[in-house]
Image (spheres, rainbow, N blue to C red):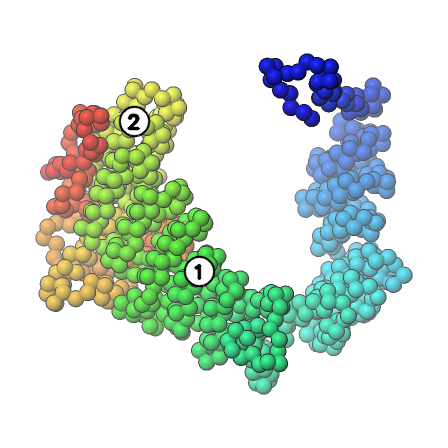
Amino acid sequence: MHPLPLFAEMDFSQNSLFGYIEDLQELTIIERPVRRSLKTPEEIERLTVDEELNDIERAVYLLSSGQDVQGTSVVANLPFLMRQNPAETLRRVLPKVREVLHVAGVEMQLTAAASFLTILQEESVSIQNYSHSFLHIILQHVEHRDAGVSNAWLETLLSVIESLPKETLRHEILNPLVSKAQLSQTLQSRLVSCKLLGKLANKFEAHIIKREILPLVKSLCQDVEYEVRSCMCRQLDIIAHGIGTELTKSVVLPELIELARDESSSVRLAAFETLVNLLEMFDAGILTPDQHLRFLEFYKKLCTLGLQQENGHNDNQIPPPNQEQEKRYASVRKNCAYNFPAMIIFVDPKNFHMELYSTFFCLCHDPEVPVRHTIAICFYEVSKLLSTGVYLIYKELIALLQDESLEVLDALVDHLPETLELLTTGGESSVQENKLLAVPDLIPALTAAEQRAAGSLKWRTHEKILQKYACLPHIISSDQIYYRFLHRMFTIMMTNNVLPVQKAASRTLCIFLRYNRKQEQRHEIIQKLIEQLGQGKSYWYRLRFLDTCEFIIELFSKSFFCKYFFLPALELTHDPVANVRMKLCYLLPKVKSTLKIPADKHLLQQLELCVRKLLCQEKDKDVLAIVKRTVLELDRMEMSMDAFQKRFYEKDLLDQEKEREELLLLEMEQLEKEKQQNEGRPSSDKIFEKKRRDNKTTAVLPKTIPMSVAGSSSCTPSTSKEIKKSKLVRSQSFSSQALHPKYGNLEKCTGKNSTTGYASVSGIGKPSVLSYTDDSFRTRNSSGNISPYSSNTSLPSTSRNMSNSVDQKNNGSKDTQPRKATLKSRKSNP
């Protein structure tokens, strides 16, 4: 088709005019037979059903005189009719369904098979009535000429067999199989017979199986069609479990050996898989020592198949493999890597170093990525099997962490926390004084792995790595995390462009902060979060600050959030960006949940003041709508009290545990400083590890727990050094045992313990039971509040006992002054 020129350039000569007419004719829309899709009056009349008919009558009418689509609809609705009126459905509707199915198409057949199965599963009718009414219909169509329809009915029949009594199975299914399995029957009939025999093998006694089923099995194993031989072969392991070991050795194994030599590769494959499935039935010591050794050596050769040429072991008689052979060799080595954990069991983990270490080394350094990917998947399982000998494979862990392929790294990271825990502890009998000594190259490998993922486009792998690094407080020391990982998390939050990655870094940073053991470092990170994120120039930073606040609420105690993050979060009600104010509104209910009355009454007033300002001054309609919904939610919230309340018991107990752990961090830091001064300043990690090893006992939680804790439980300034030490002995070290294998949610484990009467200091594993009469169990109250975060540093903080509310707006306009949070500390009331 020619493009139409502009009018200024058009030639109105006769030739050109005819060209334009031809173009317009090409644009003519051809009339379509629209009326063919409409129904004629006669068709509409046939499709019309009397509205006064009930469900049963309508179903009978549609099956008798309706079209196929209407009949299919009735069949699909059959389970509903059985639930509503089973007697009438069986008496009037089911006979019509039986008649229609003889001439029904594929769609109705498939629908009927599914409906019959649903009726069986819903138990709308007794199994006796079901077998009497439905079983014959199923058996009539199980050999349908369409393979899809036949398989659908067969699946229904196999499910029905599970529920039928033995007598019904024998007369209705087993006896007809004698003729159905003959060579004179169709291929489909013999395939169905194979699957039915496998299903029936577990329904009868061994002597019945031997007399009536095994002859049919042997006949089908020798069928002329390879599809039948393969199908029957895959049922032999089910039959073997039904007849026992002795009959299996005398009857099934000879057939399997014959099938393993079959001319068809699909039959040989089925025989091999069946043989593997049958291994568990035989004694483990079936191999002689010589056979055991030959099998192991053969496995080792398969693990390096195709690599001899690269390693210089090729003689001139063997030509180099072509590309197709290399793919097959790589596939063999991949399967060997997949089965490596089973081979450790085969040789016994005690013999791993002598028998399999060199093979494991080769698989971890295989030139093909799929092989290394598979062994990375198995790495954790190998670590578990080696137990105290896990230190033997730490170099391979480092190699896989530094692998050039991100697929390998991604597979290894899935169980990285559990693997690192095994590698750094080496079993209970070999705990190291310094955790890092177990894996000296661990930290460089971990940092390199994260940076390599960060430099790629696979952000999901990067996100996963950051999530798994939350286990590091359990693996390495607090200082090592602070100097090598914590600031990296902050950098990712500030510079990465992928939101899930930023959130993962934020959560992991909060976990690092949660278990940091130096108050000065904690204050530095808190200050950095508030100034660079909460008061950051980019609205994106301020949004990430609110994400961090949400993680702080989840991971830390209420007092911690209220002291450091409550007012900085409320400052964002004045943010010039609507999205920031909107996100804050969504967070406000969680913010309010951190308050306790009456101690936090002043903070509650601040919250109410900010909400009122938003209601009065907000101009963005979307934000205002969210504010109104948030106000309703805030009004419905019940406030926690300082004393324990029954309805908040579990949450209050969990919060007390968090606060107690945070207090213990400060006390332990003070004890370490004093010990360093008295004993020549030894390493803090050695002190901490020694206390963890010595701390093996737990206190017992009394059955009757008071609902409130007396204010006298707070420690006085005269608390002696011995009392502090006793607290450390009574509580397990949560820096070394703070993390569960499921590191995604650290504190939920503590919550589970609290519901059973245990309050886990570490939040995981063995519950450290805590007595409420312990003088170290702190509470906040309006008369005497001792916060575990009091310090003389210049970090802005929010005292939980301020007497006067602060009007955020009076601190200066955000247009003329820098964004600073109103966080000046005030002295608590006496």
Look at the image and tell me in which quarter the N terminus lies. Answer: top right
| Residue at the image point whose x is 64% and y is 24% from the top | 3
Neighbor class of circle 1 (other Cα within 10 Å; few <14, some 14-19, many 20+) is few
Q: Position of 65 compared to 30: left or right? A: right
Of 691 and 228, nearer the camera is: 228
Sequence-wise, the earlier of marks 1 and 2 is 1
The answer to whether 426 is drawn above or below residue 788 in the figure is below
Q: Position of 196 compared to 659: left or right? A: right
The image quadrant of residue 213 is bottom right
Q: Position of 72 compared to 3: left or right? A: right
The reply to whether residue 55 is visible in this rendering is yes
| Residue at the image point whose x is 78% and y is 39% from the top | 108
Neighbor class of circle 2 (other Cα within 10 Å; few <14, some 14-19, many 20+) is few
Amino acid type, callout 1: Glu
> Which mark is nearer the camera, 1 or 2?
1
Residue 68 image offset from top left, x and y in percent: 81, 34
Amino acid type, callout 2: Pro
Q: Report, in whole angstroms, how far the alpha carbon at label 1 lies from the one at label 2.
A: 45 Å
SS under mark 1: loop
The residue labelled by disc 1 is 404
Of 760 and 790, nearer the camera is: 790
| Residue at the image point whose x is 19% and y is 65% from the top | 683
The residue labelled by disc 2 is 576
| Residue at the image point whose x is 62% and y is 68% from the top | 322
Q: Which of the labelled discs sits on residue 824, or is there none?
A: none
The image quadrant of residue 331 is bottom right
Of 234 and 416, nearer the camera is: 416
Residue 269 image offset from top left, x and y in percent: 69, 67
